[in-house]
Image (cartoon, helix red, strand yellow):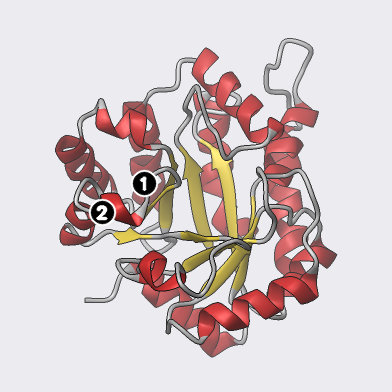
Amino acid sequence: MTSRIDRRFAELKTKGRKALVTFITAGDPDYGTCERILLGLADAGADVIELGMPFSDPMADGPAVQAAGVRALKAGQTMKKTLALVRSLRAKDKDTPVILMGYYNPIYVYPVEAFLDDVVSAGVDGLIIVDCPPEADDELCLPAVQRGLNFIRLATPTTDDARLPTVLQNTSGFVYYVSITGVTGTAAPDANAVHAQVARIKKKTQLPVVVGFGVTTPAQAKAIAAGADGVVVGSALVNAIRSSLGPGNEATGNTVAAVLDLVRNLSQPLGPR
């Protein structure tokens, strides 16, 4: 059975478009503002939505996304509220794939089986859990796949040919290629180097490969996407939120528009929708 993610990438391929995968942190800067942003992403040009699950120790996230998680947690965001955001989106939009991205600890304490049941019920399509290695697939990955969820893995510049088959083994939906070593939003990727790595990964899998970490501008998105199936933009959107906030980190009348306008600009060079 094909997933929403599978169908979306097949549809984009038919149109000659590369995917824009947008990341925001659930509950940033507050639940209501985040909901308005979330509900506007697809119309603004997002093809796939990643929703970050706020966590107090996000080891792969750079300063911008870390700060977004802190804002969300201070505003009272919980996992239940994150799933409520997905339900709100699903009431309006049945087609745009939604992926939850984050860390295992909040899932473990939920706990796992209840989390997966609630995730499926809410309308989530996939998971990216950055601290769940393939060696622990029995813990979360395989139970998620059994429920019809895509489990999306990260490949990095240090994922060599010996390691790559292990990373790809239970991956579905797409492969997320991390374009730089380090944390999110702290460096700009080199397009030629990224294209070479994507080509190497594509020799080992039929899955789409999208590129994230460091893509911040429409020009970068176009250049990186030229050699991949799509790009992930996260820190730039989170920074757009932060830059629009008032002195107490409260949303302003410009917050929603700041994010959605940037999504429109990033989406435009990736092809027809």
Q: The residue under label 2 is which amino acid type?
A: Asp
The residues bearing labels 2 and 1 have C-alpha atoms spaced at a distance of 7 Å
Q: Residues within 10 Å of mark 2 (few under 14, many from 20)?
A: some
The answer to whether mark 2 and mark 1 are in CB contact below 8 A is: yes
Residue located at (54% from left, 69% from top): 160
In which quadrant will I find the N terminus?
Answer: bottom left
Residue 20 is situated, as x and y percent measured from the top left of the image, at 61, 64
- As shown in the figure, which amino acid type bears the numbered disc 1? Cys
Image quarter of residue 110: top left
Residue 249 coordinates in the image, percent (x, y)? 70, 16
Q: Residues within 10 Å of mark 1 (few under 14, many from 20)?
A: some
Instruction: Say whether disc 2 or disc 1 marks the residue closer to the N-terminus.
Output: 1
Q: Which residue lies under the disc numbered 2?
A: 137
Question: On the picture, is 247 further left or further right than 112?
Answer: right
Furthest-top residue in this view: 248
Give the farthest residue toward the front.
162
Q: With respect to residue 186, does 224 lie above or below?
A: below
- Disc 2 is placed on an element classified as loop
Q: Residue 157 placed where, x, y %?
A: 63, 63
Rendered view: 201 above or below 263: below
The residue nearer to you, when weighing 153 against 233, is: 153
- The answer to whether residue 42 is left or right of residue 86 is right
Name the secondary structure under disc 1. Answer: loop
**Placement of the C terminus among the 4 image quadrants:** bottom right
Camera sees residue 121:
yes
Q: Is residue 273 visible?
A: no
Q: Can you give x and y, in whole percent of width and height, for residue 173 in the image?
A: 39, 69
Lateral position of residue 252 relative to residue 25, left or right? right
**Residue nearer the viewer, 163 or 76:** 163
Task: Please give the residue where the numbered disc 1 appears in the rendered image.
Answer: 132
Residue at 84% x, 66% y: name it.
219
Residue drawn 39% across the image and 73% down it: 165
